[in-house]
């Protein structure tokens, strides 16, 4: 292996190790009661906790995060790379990101620095989320829908200028869609799961840096999609990683990991 490759992998390992140190010791030492054995499928309530930090993101961004979470080492590298080049203009940052040896879903997240930062706060959570998505795609999507339905019932999920929330009937089941309020400017919600849903029914929410419960649901700065992506030229949804590797958003009787993600 070349010196360049050695340095690259050492860099990735160091970034991942630093992020892992942010894990709460209590989570490692005191697993929730009746926790499933390592490698076993996650039960629904555990999946609910896992998806809580991203469940209220717009649909395309949820898909982006789920795909990227299957590449945790690349996420760690991309977040550090983006911080190292914080002075670059958005157009240059995105052009250079396309040249990096990362999965397209990870490249696309460079446009959402706050999301990248959240994913690297706890690499243990990010890795678990990615593993769950690889092994239980439909279960993960159903968990997102459950959390949205609960938030809607509590009155903490509804349409705003930043997001449009709609409910549709799909094969006899209620499906909640979240789309950017303005397709040219996307906002990422910033919330504490305890504010949205209350205490977790099972286990613990991922140990991330959340805003105070009294703050409610806020928003990270809007992302001008025309600015970041040059009017989507050269990127588009495919460039964002929303390609044929992803599962469709709707319910299906079997995993459809190889189908394109489509939104009505």
Image (tube, rainbow, N blue to C red):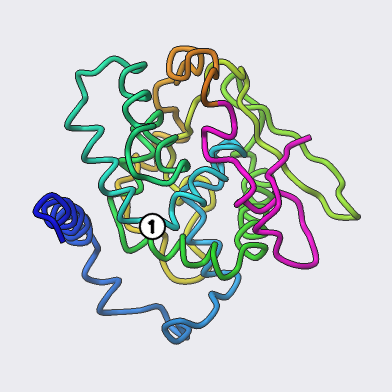
Q: Residue 27: x, y in percent?
A: 30, 71
Q: Residue 25: x, y in percent?
A: 21, 70
Q: Residue 7: x, y in percent?
A: 11, 52
**Rendered residue at 44%/12% (across/down):** 227
Figure quadrant of residue 93: top left
* Side (left or right) of 74 relative to 70: left
Element type at mark 1: helix
**Residue placed under numbered mark 1 in the picture:** 126
**Rendered residue at 73%/43% (across/down):** 176
Q: Residue 259: x, y in percent?
A: 71, 52
Looking at the image, residue 152 lies above or below residue 49: above
Question: Residue furthest toward the front?
Answer: 2
* Side (left or right) of 226 relative to 252: left
Looking at the image, residue 192 lies above or below residue 82: below
**Rendered residue at 75%/51% (across/down):** 250
Question: Residue furthest toward the right?
Answer: 172
Q: Quadrant of the N terminus?
A: bottom left
Residue 238 inside the magenta-drawn segment: yes
Magenta segment, which residues? 236-264
* Side (left or right) of 28 relative to 194: left
**Rendered residue at 59%/31% (across/down):** 237
Figure quadrant of residue 164: top right
**Mark 1 burial class by Cα count in 10 Å: few <14, some 14-19, many 20+:** many
Looking at the image, residue 149 lies above or below residue 177: below
- Nearer-the-camera pick, 239 or 53: 239
Callout count: 1
* Side (left or right) of 196 relative to 143: left
Figure quadrant of residue 84: top left
Magenta segment, principal secondary structure?
A: loop
- Nearer-the-camera pick, 178 or 90: 90
């Amino acid at each position: 292996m070349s010196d360049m490759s050695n340095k690259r992998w050492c860099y990735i390992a160091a970034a991942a190790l630093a992020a892992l140190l942010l894990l709460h010791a209590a989570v490692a030492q005191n697993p929730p009661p009746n926790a499933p054995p390592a490698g076993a499928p996650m039960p629904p309530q555990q999946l609910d906790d896992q998806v809580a930090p991203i469940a209220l993101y717009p649909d395309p961004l949820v898909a982006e995060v789920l795909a990227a979470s299957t590449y945790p080492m690349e996420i760690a590298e991309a977040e550090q790379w983006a911080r190292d080049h914080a002075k670059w203009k958005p157009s240059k940052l995105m052009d250079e990101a396309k040249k990096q040896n990362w999965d397209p879903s990870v490249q696309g997240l460079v446009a959402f620095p706050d999301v990248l930062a959240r994913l690297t706060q706890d690499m243990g959570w990010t890795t678990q989320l990615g593993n769950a998505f690889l092994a239980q795609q439909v279960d993960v999507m159903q968990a997102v829908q459950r959390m949205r339905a609960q938030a809607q019932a509590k009155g903490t999920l509804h349409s705003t200028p930043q997001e449009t929330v709609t409910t549709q009937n799909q094969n006899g089941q209620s499906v909640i869609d979240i789309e950017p309020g303005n397709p040219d400017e996307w906002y990422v919600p910033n919330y504490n799961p305890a504010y949205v849903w209350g205490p977790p029914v099972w286990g613990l929410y991922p140990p991330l840096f959340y805003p105070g419960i009294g703050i409610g649901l806020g928003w990270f700065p809007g992302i001008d999609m025309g600015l970041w992506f040059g009017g989507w030229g050269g990127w588009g949804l495919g460039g964002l990683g929303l390609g044929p590797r992803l599962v469709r958003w709707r319910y299906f009787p079997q995993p459809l990991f190889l189908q394109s993600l489509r939104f009505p």
